[in-house]
C-alpha cells in the first residue's frame, strides 16, 4: 500500500496501460485505427502548443542555441559514448546481439512528442523543446545511420525524405496552424487551460499503449529468457539515470533556469522507438532485428515511466515555488 501512496495517479495509470497492453494488445485491423487515433491526439497536442505560445516565446525558444547545442551533444555524443563503453566492457555473459542492441539504442535520435509532452507537463520551456526535439529527430534520420556505420561497422541506408515529410506533416504543421489561429482561439485556450493540459497526458498514454502493444505482438516476452530481460531492464535504468544526472548537472553548471533545465533533461534523455524500428529494418538482417531492437523497446517503456514520475516531481516543485512567491508578495 505504501507503494501506491508514493506513486502519483498518472504513474499508476501508465502501469495500468502497460498491463492492459500486455494482456490486450492492439492487433490486426485495429492497429490502423489506433495509429490514426494516436496521430490525431499528437496533432491536437501540437496544435494546442502552437496556440498557447506567443510569437516572442517561439522566437526565444528557437534562438536558444546553448540549450539546443547541449541537447544535441547529449543525444549524439554522450549517449553513443556510453554505448561504446558498455559494449566494450560487456560485464555480463549475454547474447552479443543485446550489447549491439544497446549500442544501436544509444545512436538513435530523441523522441519528439513524448519529450515535448513531458516538458509541458513539468512546466519547462515548451518552445525550446519543440525546436530541440524536432531538430534532433530530423538530424537523426541522416546522422544515426552514419553513426551505425562508424561504430557498428555496417553499411546502412541514408535518411529518408519520406520520414522527414512525416515529421513535418504530423508535428510541425499542426504547431504552425495552432499558432496562426492564436488570434481567434487564444482566449478560449487560456480559459480551458486545465482541460487542454490533459492532451499531454492522453498522448503519452496512447503512445505507451501502442508501443507496448506492438512489442507484445512481436513476442517481446518470448525472445529472451528472464535473466536477459532483467539484464536489459537494469542496464536501461542505469543508462537513463546516468544521462538524466549528467544533463541536470550540466544544466545547473551552465546557469540555465529551471524551465530550461527541464527541457534539457527531457529532450536530452530520450530515444525514439518510432525512428529506431523502421531504421533497424533497413540497417540489420531480418533475423537479427527482433533481438537487436529489444533493448530499445524496453528502454522506451522505462523512459516513459521514469520521466512521467520525474515530470510530476518537477511539477510539484514549480507549484511550490509559485505558491511561496505569492506568499512573499502577500506579506
Image (cartoon, rainbow, N blue to C red):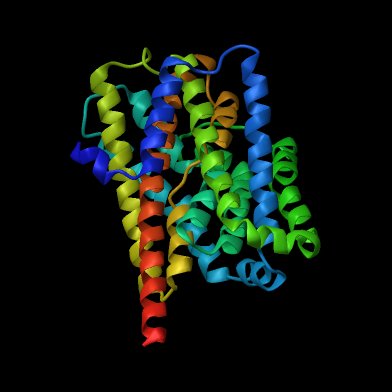
Residue 158, can we see it? no
Residue at horizontal 68%, vertical 73%?
A: 56
Going 68% across and 36% down the picture, which residue do you hit? Answer: 40
- Please name whichever residue, 300 or 154, is drawn nearer the observer in this view of the structure: 300
Using the rendered view, name the quadrant where residue 291 is placed.
top left
Specify whether 18 is left or right of 194: left
Residue at 44% x, 32% y is: 296
59 w.r.t. 289: above or below: below
Residue 269 vertical position relative to residue 264 in the rendered view, above or below: above
Q: Where residue 203 sits in the image (x, y, percent)?
A: 56, 40
Q: Residue furthest front?
A: 330
**Quadrant (top left/top right/bottom left/bottom right) for the C terminus:** bottom left
- Residue 134, compared with residue 43, is above or below; it is below
Is 4 displayed left or right of 80 in the figure? left
Front-most of residues 326 and 71 = 326
Task: Work out which quarter of the rendered image holds the N terminus and state it.
Answer: top left
Camera-nearest residue between 191 and 240:
191
Q: Point out residue 202 in the picture as x, y percentages from the top left corner.
A: 54, 40
**Where residue 12 sits in the image (x, y, percent)?**
36, 37
Question: Which of the 4 quarters of the picture holds residue 11?
Answer: top left
Amino acid at each position: 500500500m505504501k507503494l501506491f501512496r508514493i506513486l502519483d495517479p498518472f504513474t499508476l495509470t501508465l502501469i495500468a496501460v502497460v498491463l492492459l497492453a500486455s494482456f490486450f494488445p492492439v492487433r490486426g485491423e485495429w492497429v490502423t485505427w489506433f495509429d490514426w487515433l494516436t496521430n490525431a491526439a499528437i496533432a491536437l497536442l501540437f496544435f494546442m502548443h502552437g496556440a498557447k505560445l506567443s510569437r516572442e516565446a517561439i522566437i526565444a525558444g528557437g534562438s536558444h542555441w546553448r540549450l539546443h547545442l547541449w541537447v544535441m551533444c547529449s543525444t549524439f555524443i554522450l549517449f553513443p559514448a556510453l554505448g561504446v563503453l558498455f559494449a566494450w566492457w560487456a560485464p555480463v555473459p549475454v547474447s552479443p546481439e543485446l550489447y549491439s542492441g544497446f549500442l544501436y539504442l544509444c545512436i538513435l535520435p530523441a523522441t519528439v512528442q513524448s519529450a515535448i509532452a513531458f516538458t509541458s507537463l513539468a512546466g519547462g520551456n515548451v518552445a525550446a523543446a519543440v525546436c530541440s526535439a524536432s531538430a534532433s529527430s530530423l538530424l537523426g534520420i541522416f546522422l544515426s545511420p552514419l553513426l551505425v556505420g562508424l561504430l557498428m561497422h555496417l553499411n546502412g541506408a541514408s535518411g529518408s525524405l519520406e520520414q522527414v515529410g512525416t515529421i513535418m506533416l504530423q508535428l510541425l504543421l499542426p504547431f504552425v496552424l495552432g499558432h496562426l489561429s492564436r488570434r481567434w482561439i487564444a482566449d478560449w485556450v487560456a480559459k480551458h487551460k486545465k482541460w487542454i493540459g490533459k492532451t499531454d497526458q492522453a498522448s503519452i498514454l496512447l503512445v505507451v499503449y501502442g508501443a507496448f502493444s506492438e512489442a507484445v505482438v512481436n513476442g517481446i516476452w518470448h525472445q529472451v529468457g528472464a535473466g536477459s530481460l532483467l539484464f536489459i531492464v537494469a542496464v536501461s535504468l542505469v543508462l537513463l539515470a546516468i544521462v538524466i544526472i549528467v544533463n541536470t548537472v550540466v544544466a545547473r553548471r551552465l546557469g540555465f533556469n529551471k524551465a530550461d533545465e527541464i527541457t534539457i533533461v527531457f529532450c536530452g534523455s530520450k530515444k525514439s522507438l518510432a525512428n529506431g524500428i523502421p531504421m533497424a529494418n533497413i540497417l540489420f538482417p531480418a533475423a537479427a532485428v527482433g533481438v537487436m531492437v529489444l533493448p530499445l523497446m524496453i528502454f522506451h517503456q522505462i523512459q516513459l515511466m521514469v520521466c512521467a514520475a520525474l515530470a510530476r516531481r518537477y511539477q510539484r516543485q514549480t507549484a511550490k515555488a509559485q505558491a511561496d512567491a505569492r506568499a512573499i508578495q502577500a506579506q
